[in-house]
Image: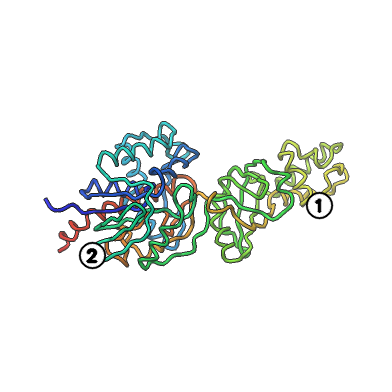
Amino acid sequence: MGKKRKIVVIGGGASGMTAAIMAARNGAEVTILEQKDRLGKKILSTGNGKCNYTNANMDVSFFRGEDPSFVSSVLHKFSTEDTLTFFEKLGVLSKKRNGYYYPKSDQASAVLDVLCMEIKKLGIKVCCNTKVLSVQKKKDFLIKTSEGTYLADALILSTGGKASPVLGSDGSGYVLAKSFGHSMTPVVPALVQLHGKGTFFKMVSGVRADAQISLYVDGKCLASDTGELQLTNYGISGIPVFQISRYASFALYENKRPLAVIDFLPEYSTRSLTALLEKRRKENTAKTAEEFLIGIFNRKLIPVLLRASGIRSDLSLHEITKEAMEKLAVKCKTFEIEIIGTNSFEQAQICAGGVRTRELHPETMESQIVKDLYLTGELLDVDGICGGYNLQWAWSTGVIAGTAAACFERKERENR
């Protein structure tokens, strides 16, 4: 039996742990270098602690990046079904809610625990509290760390991006990737809250509403989503906001002015809402403008909508013209907020942007620039929407990279 191939994985998150497992299963001697005090800390915070680890509706359209064909190739090679099987064999039974897959126990810790148990079973060396200082490639990879030096036949970069640096993703992987000659698209916060221009936010802080939100840049709608919107003392939050946030982040990066347009009653057309408001007005003439909207909107939100429509809250309904009522209906359907910022990388769930995927082989995740260098997960210019898509990307790229890195020599022999 020949000498085992030595593989070092930098980063012990979702994609790094998966890559390490697959490399070890394929006969490699594997070491994980993790700068935090334990593996997989970010996994514990996913899905509000329940870990939505994949989705039944897996399609390239739920991902963003420069090269959709790269994403398609990766997902085809390791799919939702493969993820469910992988974790079921490790011990995690799944349950599905609205297409979202969670562990049967509803505990993110279950996903992390089975990965850690497999890593221990396979004899993978884990070095926590170990910060990588530099990496050089000669014949082998020479990895200098705060805790010593490591040599590797193959190196897998699974460092994550810049989102949630407290959990380990501090952008250091970008520096390493660039040191090997890789180029990057701009990196911005994604799946993140948005800051709005206006003086009314403190008045409506805490209000939640089922709404549709659309993001416009230069008059063009780039993204739209529907769900529970949360109004904060600085702007807007909630899953539909997260889904469109990457487009706002890039627009702000380019010094453009993104505009969020909120439809507070997406189940109504402007015409049917106008008819509803007119009917209520005729039936409640003794009420004030503010009073007659109670039962439709949160009470905190009513004065804001009326002011935006040019209607005084204390006006009696018989004083409000039909034209003013039509304007109110339009404003309820198209309430505009100029976006002036996002929350920081510290609050962002993921990053958008990263290492250009055109510089990798999608069938192996190997660098096209440096032989035996592999890159995975959030480090790459691929980001998914909420719903388990980013974890699926981590599992898929990790499995592909780990398998390819360990099996490289065998494949080389087969190709001769």
Q: Residues within 10 Å of mark 1 (few under 14, many from 20)?
A: few
Look at label 2 and name its amino acid.
Answer: Lys
Q: Earlier in the sequence, mark 1 or mark 2?
A: 2
Quarter of the image where one finds residue 261: bottom right
**Which residue lies under the disc numbered 2?**
139
Residue 74: image location, x then y, percent:
35, 55
Of residues 195 and 149, the one drawn nearer to the viewer in this rendering:
149
Residue 294: image location, x then y, percent:
75, 37
Q: Is residue 306 above or below residue 155?
A: above
Look at label 1 and name its amino acid.
Answer: Gly
Q: How is the image coloured?
A: rainbow
Say what secondary structure mark 2 lies in: loop
Q: Residue furthest left?
A: 1
Q: Is residue 155 above or below residue 295?
A: below
Q: Residues within 10 Å of mark 2 (few under 14, many from 20)?
A: few
Quadrant for the C terminus in the image: bottom left
Q: Which residue is painted at 67% across and 57% down in the image?
A: 338
Residue 17: image location, x then y, percent:
34, 46
Say what secondary structure mark 1 lies in: loop
**Marks 1 and 2: CB-CB under 8 Å?**
no
Name the disc covering residue 310, or none.
1
Measure the C-alpha gap from mark 1 to mark 2.
72 Å
Q: Is residue 39 above or below residue 409?
A: above
In this rendering, would 323 be left or right of 19?
right
Name the disc covering residue 13, or none.
none
